[in-house]
């Protein structure tokens, strides 16, 4: 897929549906997908820090999570026409996981928040399998990786804030059989209500 570049940061010209079809294709060909939401703050961070830019650009799908990116793309004749937000992308992925019987794991946020998010997700998607969850403050990294592995998670949402969550995904993705990773920032707090 041809990416569009904003101040050196790649963004995929995708819609929610296109992300799901790309992921589906990657699953069929045995490739992992990593989704990162690109908003103006991340673009600014990437301008200051080459490592952040590289981290974003090395993800599979950089979703256009900012109206400024949509405007900039339109202005220069690009193809990005709508915002694809991290929180709504997570809902599309949850729906996809429910339909395809993919096992979901939630990692990050405070204990109270992630456990309530799990409850609310299960209410909202009655046929989903949330295989496990872990808060973002206890437990060492190897233990968390083991736990995710033991749960045989297919879809992993990581809510540790940026760029912590993207760094975590990059460090650990090869150790995991997870098919889809999404860094979701404060989304578990939103799901917790
Ligand atoms: N968080 C965490 N572990 C940490 C630091 C943060 O689990 O070591 C969680 C925090 O509880 C919150 C989320 O990460 O749920 C960060 O959300 P925020 O909205 O700040 O992230 P952003 O989207 O701005 O990157």
Image (cartoon, helix red, strand yellow):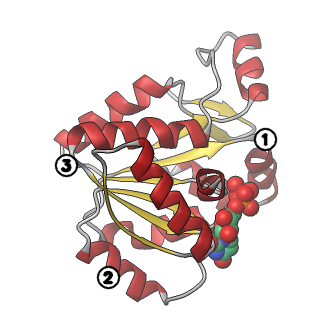
Mark 3 vs mark 1: which is more N-terminal?
Answer: 3
Say whether mark 3 is within 8 Å of ligand 1.
no
Q: CA distance from mark 3 to mark 2?
A: 21 Å
Quarter of the rendering containing residue 65: top right
Q: CA distance from mark 1 to mark 2?
A: 34 Å
Q: Where on the image, by quarter, is ligand 1?
A: bottom right
Q: Position of residue 50 (x, y in %)?
A: 70, 59
Q: CA distance from mark 3 to mark 1?
A: 32 Å
Rendered residue at 46%/58% (across/down) = 119
**Image position of 99 (left or right of 28):** right
Q: Is residue 126 above or below residue 109?
A: above
- Contact between marks 3 and 1 (CB within 8 A): the answer is no
Instruction: Write down the residue under mark 2.
Output: 146
Q: Position of residue 167 (x, y in %)?
A: 56, 68
Mark 1 vs mark 2: which is more N-terminal?
Answer: 1
Instruction: Write down the residue under mark 3.
Output: 30
- Please rate how many residues cluster around mark 2, counting C-alpha atoms within 10 Å: few if below 14, some from 14 to 19, many from 20: few
Callout 1 secondary element: helix
- Please rate how many residues cluster around mark 3, counting C-alpha atoms within 10 Å: few if below 14, some from 14 to 19, many from 20: few
Foreground residue among 120 and 49: 120
Quarter of the rendering containing residue 22: top left
Quarter of the rendering containing residue 131: bottom left
Rendered residue at 39%/88% (across/down) = 143
Foreground residue among 46 and 16: 16
Instruction: Write down the residue under mark 1.
Output: 40
- The quarter in which the N terminus is drawn is top left
């Amino acid at each position: 897929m041809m990416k569009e570049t904003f101040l050196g940061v790649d963004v995929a010209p995708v819609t929610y549906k296109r992300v799901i079809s790309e992921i589906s294709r990657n699953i069929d060909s045995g490739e992992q997908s990593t989704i990162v939401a690109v908003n103006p703050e991340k673009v600014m961070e990437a301008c200051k820090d080459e490592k952040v830019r590289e981290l974003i650009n090395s993800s599979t799908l950089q979703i256009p999570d900012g109206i400024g990116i949509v405007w900039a793309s339109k202005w220069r004749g690009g193809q990005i026409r709508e915002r694809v937000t991290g929180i709504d992308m997570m809902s599309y992925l949850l729906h996809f996981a429910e339909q395809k019987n993919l096992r979901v794991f939630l990692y990050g946020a405070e204990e109270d928040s992630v456990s309530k998010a799990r409850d609310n997700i299960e209410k909202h998607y009655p046929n989903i399998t949330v295989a496990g969850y872990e808060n973002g403050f206890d437990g060492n990294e190897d233990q968390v990786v083991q736990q995710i592995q033991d749960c045989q998670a297919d879809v992993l949402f990581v809510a540790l804030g940026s760029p912590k969550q993207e760094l975590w995904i990059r460090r650990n993705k090869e150790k995991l059989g997870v098919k889809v990773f999404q860094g979701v920032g404060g989304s578990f707090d939103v799901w917790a209500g």
